[in-house]
Image (cartoon, rainbow, N blue to C red):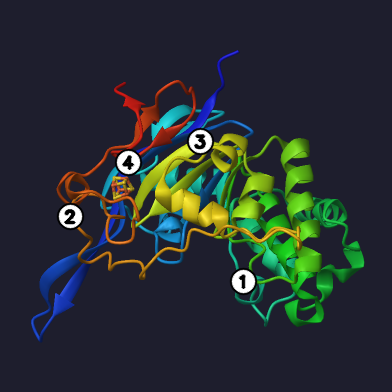
Amino acid sequence: MEKEIKLEIKELKKYYPVLKGAFKKVVGQVKAVDGVSFSVNKGETFGIVGESGCGKTTLGKCLVNLQNPSSGELLYNDTETGVKNALNLSKKESFKMRKKIQIVFQDPYSSLNPLKTVYSAFEEPLKIHKMGDKSKRKKIITEIFELINLKPEFMHRYPHEFSGGQRQRICIARALCIEPEIIICDEPVSSLDVSVQAQILNLLKDLQEQKELTYIFIAHDLSIVEYMSDRIAVMYLGKIVELADAKLLYKTCKHPYTEALVSAIPTPDFDKEPIRNVMKGDLPSPINPPNGCSFHTRCPLAEERCKIEEPNLKRVKGSENHYVACHLVSTVEE
Ligand code: SF4
């Protein structure tokens, strides 16, 4: 059966101007997201991985309209109104769409207002989106508290009275209470203790099943992304360099950058010496990315051609759902 596409991103770019001098002359552009295209199916978890500074968080913010993309298309398949370009909506339509796509941030401490009780933090979006009267709102909030395994009597407490894990559960629940269809999870467990991370990840999985949610899961920890995702895109300097089904990517990754990331995953086998592909150098500046393949300055396999010609993301020969941007991999034109 053909899968229903929930979100389709086409050639999305987000550039920030670099200003210099008293007259603020534009002297360059930070290419945070540089022509990214992918689609996300209904009910799936689409993982995005990459080093800090690769553009994954900026991409997530563009998807929820917290950043205005410089160009591109963001086609959102609304259950009620059909497919719409989210970057081309009227104020009213944009307000409605914000309800459908929510984001959960990395830091649950700064995501909640320390001066407001958790109940008010939940009630505010419900009021903004005109969801029920006072008693209906209380019912929604009580139900959502039970859903995330927190006692409803805790709802009148302040954020500092909760642990880090509880706060992140509260942030997830707050995103859920206005009934979104898509949730962008931006490093949702990175600031939590390892013992709490599994609880949050399992909660996200349970909620996805119960409410038929679609997730975009952004993280730098590959083992967590593998656990959560159906498909994964690997980002480097604002571009996708590899995209594949989660299992396939970890077993047979093709791009030298993905190989280096996968080889850096710690293994629990203490008797076996891990083989690591250590990358040389740091991530180049997105203001002045290298010509040709942007990974060539760190790639152990780089050839002369890689310095001149930029590889496009193409389907790997003999594979259905595996795409890579590297000159050395056999690919097919589509
Ligand atoms: Fe390395 Fe060249 Fe492939 Fe880029 S195109 S990843 S530089 S081999």
Within 10 Å of the Cα at label 2, are there few (<14), some (14-19), or many (20+) other Cα atoms? some
How far apart are the alpha carbons under marks 1 and 2? 35 Å
Q: In front of the other: label 3 or label 1? A: 3
Q: Disc 4 vs disc 1: Cβ atoms closer than 8 Å?
A: no
Q: Secondary structure at mark 4?
A: loop
Q: Is mark 4 within 8 Å of ligand 1?
A: yes
Mark 4 vs 1, N-terminal side? 1
- First along the sequence among labels 3 and 1: 1
Q: Which residue position is annotated with label 3? A: 244
- Looking at marks 3 and 4 on the same chain, the residue that comes earlier in the sequence is marked by 3
Q: Is residue 63 visible?
A: no
Can residue 53 be seen at all in this image of the molecule? yes
Between 146 and 94, the one nearer to me in the picture:
146
Q: Amino acid at mark 1?
A: Asp
- Farthest-out residue, bottom: 22
**Image position, residue 69 (x, y; %):** 31, 52
What residue lies at 40% left-to-right and 32% top-to-bottom?
84
Question: Would you name the residue on which mark 2 appears?
Answer: 291
Name above or below for residue 243 compared with residue 83: below
Residue highlighted by disc 1: 107
Q: Which residue is mark 4?
A: 326
Measure the alpha-carbon separation of dots 4 and 1: 35 Å
The amino acid type found where label 2 is placed reads: Asn
User: Quick check: marks 3 and 4 in contact, CB under 8 Å?
Assistant: no
Left or right side of 248 for 65: left
Q: Earlier in the sequence, mark 2 or mark 3?
A: 3
Other residues around mark 1 within 10 Å, as few (<14) / some (14–19) / many (≥20): some
